[in-house]
Image: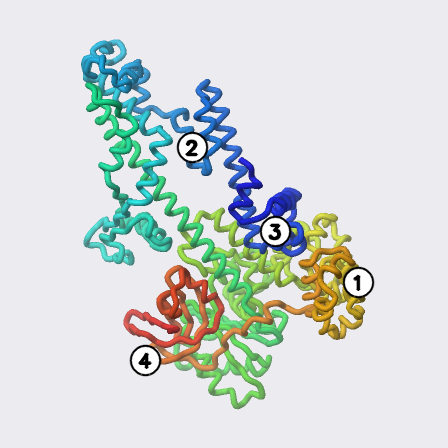
Amino acid sequence: MNLTNVLGEEFNLKHWQVENTIQLIDEGNTIPFIARYRKEAHGSMDDQTLRDFFDRLEYLRGLEQRKKEVSALIAGQDKMTNEIAIALENAVTLSEVEDIYRPYRPKRKTRASIARDKGLEPLANQILEQSELNATPIEMAEEYVNEEKGIASAKEALSGALDIIAENISDNASIRKRLKVIFMEHGILQVSPKNEDDDSVYNTYYNSIEPIKKIVSHRVLAIDRGEKQGFLKVSLQVDTEKAINIINSVYLKEPSSCSEAIKQAAFDSYSRLIFPSIEREIRNELTDAAVVKSIKVFSLNLKHLLMQPPVKGKVAMGMDPGYRTGCKIAVVDPTGLVLDTDVIYITHSEEKLLAAKTAIEQLIKKHKVEVIAIGNGTASKETEIFTANLIKTIKNDLDYNISYMVVNEAGASVYSASKLAASEFPNFDVTLRSAVSIARRLQDPLAELVKIDPKAIGVGQYQHDMPEKQLDNALKGVVEDCVNTVGVDLNTASASLLSQVSGLSAAVCNNIIAYREAVGAFRERAELKRVPKLGPKAFEQCAGFLRVPESKNILDNTAVHPESYKAAEQLLSICGYTLNDLKENNIGAIKNIIDEIGAEEISEEIGIGVPTLNDIADELLKPGRDPRDELPPPLLRTDVLDIKDLKQDMELQGTVRNVIDFGAFVDIGVHHDGLLHISQICDRYIKHPSQVLKVGDVINVKILDVDVDKKRIALTMR
């Protein structure tokens, strides 16, 4: 297999792009570094395309390795033929390779292997010859009766021979390939309840029938879960006669005395061996495809959640609601430093409710709290009502505006019980750590959420059913891309945040923090080279993603890589500017000047490619700026509605909390998220809600329907 040709065709890339990208990967460069600083080499592919390319490269290399292994194993049995070699060469999936190897794979004890041990393979071959001169199968079988070998009758001999034929048919890779096509094109997935009397969340799937080629991924995952939990029975239905005819068309020759015996073996092979095997394979393929799609949805949602705009420069109060243990409170300054903590009880008694109001009012006034983050877990509704009423009461006493936002607290308890949280807040109770995390999530979602296992953040569909390693790899890639897109302040970043920076290992991150504590704040990027174990390669990979706002060289606070500092200064000079002009943000015309002179001409003069030139120019125009600041701010509230207040056709603003295959869940400020079905998102046809919506979007919606008893809210954007 020519990897360059295959990858070029699949990703629509030229040969030089494929070869350069493979070389960059093999040299140990990280995806964020390749995506950002080697655009000329790969043709400006984005980070997600590069990750897909990397995954596909690994799969194809694994496929080639397995082909070599199988070829050697078959050759070791002296059974390699040109036909097998060609089939292996043409195989494009691991499944095809395994089907080719199936007849030669060492088998456990089977009916066919027992028959072979008794010496019945020659009889099976005689029957398959279907010669006109042959006697009937039972007559041929008479010769193989041998009580010493355990063959007491001709009937037993014939039965053993047919078992051998059935297994040979089952091992035929060509037949299996044809049958899989029939299954995928014409197969039906039939679902029924394991117990008709059971009422479960899966009752919408009871007695459902759906074509395999049309079933959508979230239904596959739901059916899989229902089957695992013992509520559903799932079977695959296909036209048996059509399948048997395919087998017979291969194995039956002219009508002979052996035809019926071969038909019998074919039926046995299909029903006992082929059908159950292909049914498992098809089910696995459906699940694998659904998993890939679900992980993509999770990854996309996670990316948008991490890239939500931070609420900067404000003192924040975090509220971790609870009934029995009370509502935990933490006040943090604009940098996330904890100023105060408390526990209030708003659901216990009128007396404690009044005490809670007094305590929160005092904390707000003492620390000039401007935003309140409320966790969306247990007792969230009561806490939100309490907060909204309190804001109404005290807003006239404040000389500034105060508002609140309900924050997704998924994973906060995981973080608060972690070693990291214990090291950050050794003297805090676990629940108070959660309140701090909730407050910080509003201030800087990215910096806080990187401390939590992405799976615990809960912005996907069926994430707990995903293969752990596959999900971990995908989500870690998303976190890494987000962190490196935003950049990290070298002098304030936690070890968790630093560990997501391109090229930095956990040990090096700890060394960076130890260096900061021993020597003081970094004064320039180049000082990173003094950190133990941070060698030239690591510096190359990480330097462009680390910011040093305190540096005298303003380029140290941009995404311009140190290797391009000289080029950046030359660009400024060509355009008539200096680094001092850059510090004063006085280079607004740089893009126009580049257009007038010509990007190609300037690039050639300073020795860089046009993509790098454009990236440098973009960075020079916004030194030190956070790319998230360009996004719409989060929706902050001062009042709350009850689900009973909702009426049909009422128009509201809401925040998209989760995007899934069949729609999106939207927080409209009534504690219960409303469902915006894919059919209600826009007037045109869309394949997936993510074409229009993303997590964190603030949108206008209209109430379509409300079921107060079931706490269901249907929304529309149409």
Instruction: Give the distance between the C-alpha atoms of the residues marked 3 and 1, in whole angstroms.
Output: 28 Å
Q: Is residue 259 above or below residue 435?
A: above
Q: Secondary structure at mark 3?
A: helix
Instruction: Give the distance between the C-alpha atoms of the residues marked 2 and 1, in whole angstroms.
Output: 58 Å
Where residue 668 sits: x, y (%)?
41, 75
Where residue 420 sits: x, y (%)?
58, 57
Please tell me which residue is depicted at 40% across the width and 63% down the height of the picture: 686
Identify residue for label 1.
Answer: 570
Callout 4 touching callout 3 (CB < 8 Å): no
The type of residue carrying mark 1 is Gln
Q: Which mark is residue 647?
A: 4
Q: Secondary structure at mark 4?
A: loop
Q: Which mark is residue 98?
A: 2
Q: Is residue 154 left or right of residue 104?
A: left
Q: Quadrant of the C terminus?
A: bottom left
Q: Residue 547: tell me if it is visible.
A: no
Q: Residue 574: tell me if it is visible.
A: yes
Identify residue for label 3.
Answer: 31
